[in-house]
Amino acid sequence: LTRLQGRTAIVTGASGGIGASTAILLARAGCNVVLLARRQAALDEVAQKCKEEGGEGIKVFTKVLNVNDRENVEELVGELISAGFETFDVLVNNAGGAIGKEPVGEIALADIDTMLSTNLVSMMQITQLFVTEMKKQDSGHIINIGSIAGREAYVGGAVYCAVKHAVRAFTTSLMKEVVATGIRVSEVAPGFVETNFSVTRFRGDEEAAKKVYEGMQPLTPEDIAEEIVWCALRPPHVQIAELFVLPTAQAGATIIARKT
Ligand code: 8X3
């Protein structure tokens, strides 16, 4: 399929996990990629892979961006236009994550703030920037990464589940608002995917993170990247409104079949 050739995709949280895999697959599909993340070295590595996959024909642009740095985010569209990007075709809002598993009553305010601003406020800000451009074009595709946590609230996930439910609500409102335009809106909501997600959730405790996926086969970042790119590759009149993707051994946030 050549539908993404010569198009431009913006991916947040592109330095690792689902974001990095998605950027690489988009490049392979012939798409120009704009990679946003906090860590330059990791971004450079992903950019290199994108260039290898996409070849001479594609543009790869990286920008170190803390998505919570609101002024820098605001400048993004202007910078991309100066760098020669003419259209903004796909936006993958992937940046986000969970911090801690404390019960309500014991959650640090700083962690609440970080989860809200990373998963929600910055996603909303970036979406507003690009939906404005997409409306001018009367085309574009906004793909938000949701989660099983946006469908099912679980013990130890009060804030993360709340923000992912909010991501889902925001995505649905947006889809309804742009129904009369050529803009498509999708939510891709995975269950367990083995990335740095759990390491961050457990504040760097690799052992605790590993335990999450013990005795079961989680999804890989590539699995979800394939789904994201599949959504983007549908013809313009086809909108995958939502895609809920679980490992075969998972049937709910806490319904996991483990082989011991
Ligand atoms: C997915 C992570 O732990 O909610 O966002 O399944 S989890």
Image (cartoon, helix red, strand yellow):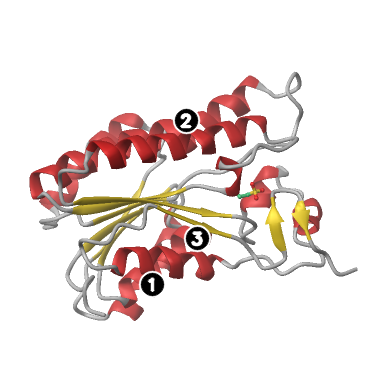
Please report the residue visible at 42 percent of the width from the left and 65 percent of the height from the top: 22
Q: In which quarter of the image is the N terminus?
A: bottom left
Give the mark, 2 or 1, whose residue is nearer the N terminus.
Answer: 1
Residue located beneath label 2 in the image: 117
Sequence-earlier tag: 3 or 2: 3
Q: In this view, does 230 lie above or below 168?
A: below
The answer to whether residue 76 is left or right of residue 255 is: left
Residue 90 appears in which quarter of the rendering? bottom left
Q: Does the residue labelled 2 lie within 8 Å of ligand 1?
A: no
Tell me: residue 257, above or below residue 160: below
- Residue that appears at 36% across and 58% down: 240
The residue to which callout 1 is attached is 25
Q: How crowded is mark 3: few (under 14 residues within 10 Å), some or many (20 or more)?
A: many
**Looking at the image, can residue 227 be seen?**
yes
Q: Residue 18 carries which label?
A: 3
Q: Where is residue 104 in the image (x, y as percent from the top left)?
A: 73, 23
Identity of the amino acid at label 3? Ile
- Measure how far apart labels 3 and 1 are at the Cα level: 11 Å
Of 207 and 8, the residue lying toward us: 8
- Label 1 is placed on what type of residue? Leu
Q: Residue furthest right?
A: 260
Give the Cα separation between the discs numbered 3 and 2: 19 Å
Position in image of residue 9 (x %, y %)? 27, 59
- The amino acid on which the numbered mark 2 sits, given as a three-letter code, is Ser
